Amino acid sequence: MNAHFSFQQHVPAWQTELGNAFTNSRDLLEFLNLPTENLPLSKQAARNFVMRVPIGYAECMEKGNPDDPLLRQVLPVNDELNSYPGFINDPVGDLDATKHGGIIHKYHGRVLLITTGGCAIHCRYCFRRNFPYPDLQMNKTRLFQALQYIRDNSEVSEVILSGGDPLLLSDNRLGLLVQKISQFQHIKRIRIHTRIPIVLPSRITTQLLENLTRIPQQIIMVLHCNHSNEISQAVVNACSMLKQHRIHLFNQTVLLKGVNDRIDQLVQLSEKLFASNVLPYYLHLLDKANGTGHFEVSETTAISIMGGIKAKLPGYLVPKLVRETPGEASKTGVCC
Ligand code: SF4
């Protein structure tokens, strides 16, 4: 009798969820019980920047609502094809600040490392939607160059892992990366910028957290959440796991027309973030990337919204309104 051995590779649940993400508008709209006819869908916009929406994120949308604030963030529409004055492909000057190995060095004491071009969700307003990731994302040679750069710049005390989304790397690759960075004595903190705990909370596993927190340096995570409806129970649980592993949690939000440009929405977002152990940190004016002009909220409106938020929340729940201007020494505060 022949013995049959099967070597089944274990696929983590989060990867399966990612593999089942919505990648075309029709399927997503059918799931949401929305007819396609009256929506300004654009195949060209979807070709320019493909749609990707994890099912768990879609489940946070209100069925039958074409104006749902989460749907608006992910649906490819005709407006993306319009050009707007001042909107360009690299609005924050990332390419001018790029060094060897996918390192972007703009600010004193901090460097940013592009780890991957992949994301769990494709946000239509993304400032890096036109970014030439294949030229910069991490491979063996670039990692070697990046580590050399960090080693040779002893004034750098913080390395920011960005992308794309760094949490798309496997547990092993991410664990190895933070370990290699942590070997330099001048590095005090490693910061991870990620939208994954919000849009794919199943990615936050014990194995990932153990791999990340084996180093002596502090780990900071800056989440990216734009609306309180994004904070499901699964997101709350993921934040709780991060907190239990002593990861410091902050949030940044992009101010987006038709998504979160109301005082009550932002107040509710701050309240819900804090209840989930996350501190509201930045409210960003939109970076002017081609294809995103329809999301812009004017500076005057933004300042007025901030006034309303301040009147309703204690200071520690009020995010700082900022913009990024190429060439500046840091993000620029927009109002006091
Ligand atoms: S997750 Fe971040 S980097 Fe990725 S598409 Fe959204 S905003 Fe852009």
Image (tube, rainbow, N blue to C red):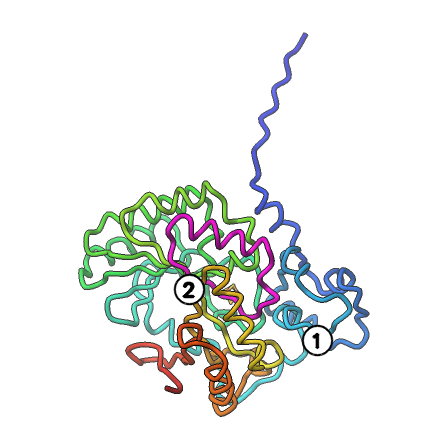
Instruction: For mark 1, give the secondary structure.
Output: loop
- Disc 2 under 8 Å from ligand 1? The reply is no
In the picture of the structure, the residue carrying the numbered disc 2 is 250
In this rendering, position of residue 155 left or right of residue 319? left
Label 2 packing within 10 angstroms: few (<14), some (14-19), many (20+) = many
Instruction: Specify whether residue 155 is painted magenta.
Output: no
Q: In the rendering, at what x and y percent does residue 16 appear?
A: 62, 45
> As shown in the figure, which amino acid type bears the numbered disc 2?
Phe
Apparent side of residue 69 relative to residue 222 in the rendered image (left or right)? right
Query: At x 81% / y 74%, what residue is drawn?
Result: 37
Tell which residue pokes out farthest to the bottom in this image.
300
Q: CA distance from mark 2 to mark 1?
A: 28 Å
* Left or right of residue 164: residue 104: left
Residue positioned 47% across, 42% down in the render? 206
Q: Is mark 1 within 8 Å of ligand 1?
A: no
Residue at 68% in and 58% down: 22
**Where are the magenta residues, as a range?**
222-250
Q: Quadrant of the C terminus?
A: bottom left
Residue at screen point 44% across, 55% down? 166
Q: Is residue 216 above or below residue 164?
A: above
